Image: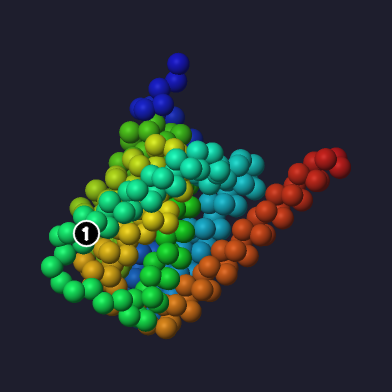
Amino acid sequence: MKNKWLRFRTDKETLFALACGALMILLSVAMMWLDGEVASIILRDALMIVLLGFFTPLYYIVIVKKQSPAVLGLHKNRLAASLAINVGAGVALLAMFVSKNTEAIVFTQGSFYAVTYIFAAGIFEMVFIYGFLRYELERAFGIVPAIFLTAVFYSLHHAGFQPEFAKLFFVGVMYVAAFYFTRSLFALFPCFWGVGACWDVLVNSDAGAQLRNRTSFVVALAMLATMIGISIFIWRKKRETIHGKGLG
């Protein structure tokens, strides 16, 4: 019987996933060397979030490996249970934050711009980190190592804009462990992950100040539109592949 909790079975697919994870970290680190709004849009938004973090895992899993997006946690199975965990954990997390907060919180138009950007970037984290990397790491090493290794990648990918590695590592462990209750990303996104991300960035970190502007809002909308376009492209590509086999 295969041990799902701990194993060692690496292959070229594992190496590809690790290389993608390393590239994600390098792009983030490069933001420290190439400072500025334009560099951030190119390195983080275009290359890391959209191209590497969204297009690559979906294309690789669905088109190259010919697998279902369900392996990434994108499925309707146990949807009610997943959403219950999502909302319940999100409410509990928000209640904990509010109970410990001692400063007044004002939600402004800038806050709305920042929240929009955070959620757009959150799609990348779900698909690439908790979906793709977690799946390949679990397939190679088992569930327990996958939880901790995924959390390491989650922590290190913040290197260029929020270098709080220890705290983010434990946050990553919390999220990926919660994922395994239903093996669905809908147990994390949007409420559970969203409450933690928005509070951490907007209240507990200086990183939020860089997102409270119209440019962040426009970039977020552009990323969302591009992700929708990528999803349509991959869906059509998959249908063409299926129909091509049928005709053959």
Give the class, few, some or many, for how many residues have Cα within 10 Å of label 1's Cα (few <14, many ≥20): some
Q: For residue 29, what is the image quadrant?
A: bottom left
Which residue type carries mark 1? Answer: Phe
Left or right? Give the position of 53 relative to 242. left
Residue at 36% across / 38% down in the picture? 146
Answer whether residue 52 is visible to the viewer in this image. yes
The residue to which callout 1 is attached is: 97
Q: For residue 178, what is the image quadrant?
A: top left
Quarter of the picture holding the N terminus: top left
Left or right? Give the position of 67 relative to 194. right
Quarter of the picture holding the C terminus: top right
Residue 46 drawn at (x, y percent): 49, 69
Residue 171 drawn at (x, y percent): 27, 51
Element at badge 1?
helix
Answer whether residue 187 is visible to the viewer in this image. no
Residue at 27% across / 53% down in the picture? 93
